[in-house]
Image (cartoon, grey):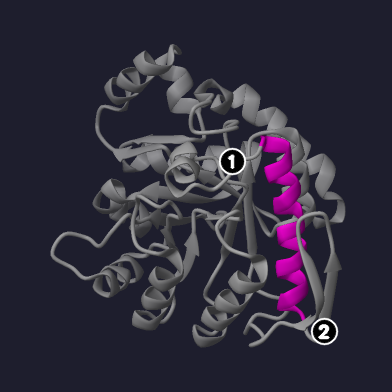
């Protein structure tokens, strides 16, 4: 039986030690990472649009993305133009990660209003519709509660027909249902109404079973084309996975076994990591993961095995 194609990206808060950002992108490409993600918070990393453009200019196969653009920071017509330009110049190597906003400090420090979760998701739904409309050809109009577009032809047109892949993640039923119907990449996460309301136990296997079923029920004929993504909060290659899991479990109030089985955690030696990736693909369909910057060197042997 053919092994599933599993890809691993990395979220970078800055360049690797001793490297520029462009050089870091080349290292990630050469190491086999599929995607370089940049954050979109006011207190982390570079501005994501500049970071994405710089990374694509330095590489030839690496995909670039955000984890994730906050819809409240930029008007969708402005973002559509910037992303179409990067997609065109990189010949189709971007993914468009989008979110409703959750980091309270982003709103507090900038003076932006942080609306209740329902309003933020309402606005994100319109945001995606506007982006997709402007990624298409010809004049586009939209009359929504939050955005109005009057016969705007989004230019330049992206390299990718219809626009680059849309990446939406969530932990609640409404957000995951929307992602199943509108996204190309669906991230299945613990619920996160805001950075002050984190629910880590919502990432345990039984909860993920339910979330994946929500996506499958809502996707209909789109299901076969969706890619399921997991953002790895904890990822490490180690010969003592149980000890590492016990440390995490103590902070959450669950067992080490619960931690090791969670798709938001990937800990073990290279063989264990590969085995868990295959098990999660079989159970839930996950084929795309993002590790954090400190795990880059750990995961290079895993990428070698995945080849």
Q: Where is residue 116 in the image (x, y as percent from the top left)?
A: 67, 35
Look at the picture and state if 53 lies above or below 215: below
Q: Where is residue 233 in the image (x, y as percent from the top left)?
A: 42, 37
Determine whether 115 is above or below 257 in the image.
below
- Residue 274, given in percent of the width and then of the height, sits at 42, 44
**Helix, strand or loop for disc 1:** loop
Q: Residue 139 carries which label?
A: 2
Q: What stretch is highlighted in magenta?
A: 116-136
For the residue pair 43 and 13, the one nearer the viewer reads as 43
- Specify the farthest residue to the front: 111
Which comes sooner in the sequence, label 2 or label 1? 1
Check residue 71 for magenta coloring: no
Camera-side residue: 87 or 283?
87
Q: Quadrant of residue 221?
A: bottom right
Q: Point out which mark residue 81 bears.
A: none
| Residue found at x 31% / y 51% | 293
Q: How crowded is mark 2: few (under 14 residues within 10 Å), some or many (20 or more)?
A: few
Identify the residue at image location x=76%, y=56%. Answer: 146
Q: Nearer the viewer, mark 2 or mark 1?
A: 1
Disc count in the image?
2
Q: In this view, does 15 lie above or below 190?
A: below
Q: Position of residue 126 (x, y in %)?
A: 77, 57
Q: Which mark is residue 114?
A: 1
Measuring 54% from the left and 48% from the top, which residue is drawn there? 112
- In the picture, residue 161 is in which quadrant? bottom right
Distance between mark 2 and mark 1 Cα atoms: 32 Å
């Amino acid at each position: 039986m053919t092994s599933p194609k599993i890809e691993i990206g990395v979220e970078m808060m800055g360049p690797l030690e001793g490297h520029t950002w462009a050089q870091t992108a080349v290292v990630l490409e050469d190491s086999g990472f599929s995607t370089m993600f940049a954050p979109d918070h006011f207190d982390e990393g570079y501005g994501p649009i500049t970071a994405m453009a710089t990374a694509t200019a330095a590489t030839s196969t690496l995909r670039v993305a955000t984890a994730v653009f906050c819809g409240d920071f930029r008007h969708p017509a402005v973002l559509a133009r910037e992303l179409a330009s990067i997609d065109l110049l990189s010949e189709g190597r971007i993914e468009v990660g989008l979110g409703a906003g959750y980091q309270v400090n982003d709103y507090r420090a900038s003076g932006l209003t942080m609306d209740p979760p329902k309003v933020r998701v309402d606005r994100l739904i319109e945001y995606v519709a506007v982006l997709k409309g402007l990624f298409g050809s010809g004049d586009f109009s939209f009359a929504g509660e939050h955005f109005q577009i009057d016969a705007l032809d989004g230019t330049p047109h992206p390299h990718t027909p219809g626009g680059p892949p849309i990446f939406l993640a969530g932990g609640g039923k409404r957000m995951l249902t929307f992602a199943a119907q509108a996204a190309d990449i669906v991230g299945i996460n613990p619920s996160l109404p805001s950075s002050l309301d984190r629910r880590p136990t919502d990432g345990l296997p039984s909860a993920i079973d339910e979330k994946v079923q929500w996506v499958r029920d809502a996707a209909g004929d789109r299901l076969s084309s969706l890619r399921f993504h997991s953002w790895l909060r904890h990822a490490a290659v180690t010969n003592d996975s149980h000890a590492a899991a016990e440390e995490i479990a103590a902070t959450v109030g669950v067992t080490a076994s619960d931690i090791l089985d969670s798709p938001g955690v990937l800990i073990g030696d290279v063989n264990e990591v590969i085995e868990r990736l295959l098990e999660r693909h079989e159970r839930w369909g996950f084929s795309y993961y993002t590790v954090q910057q400190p795990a880059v060197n750990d995961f290079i042997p895993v990428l070698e095995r995945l080849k």
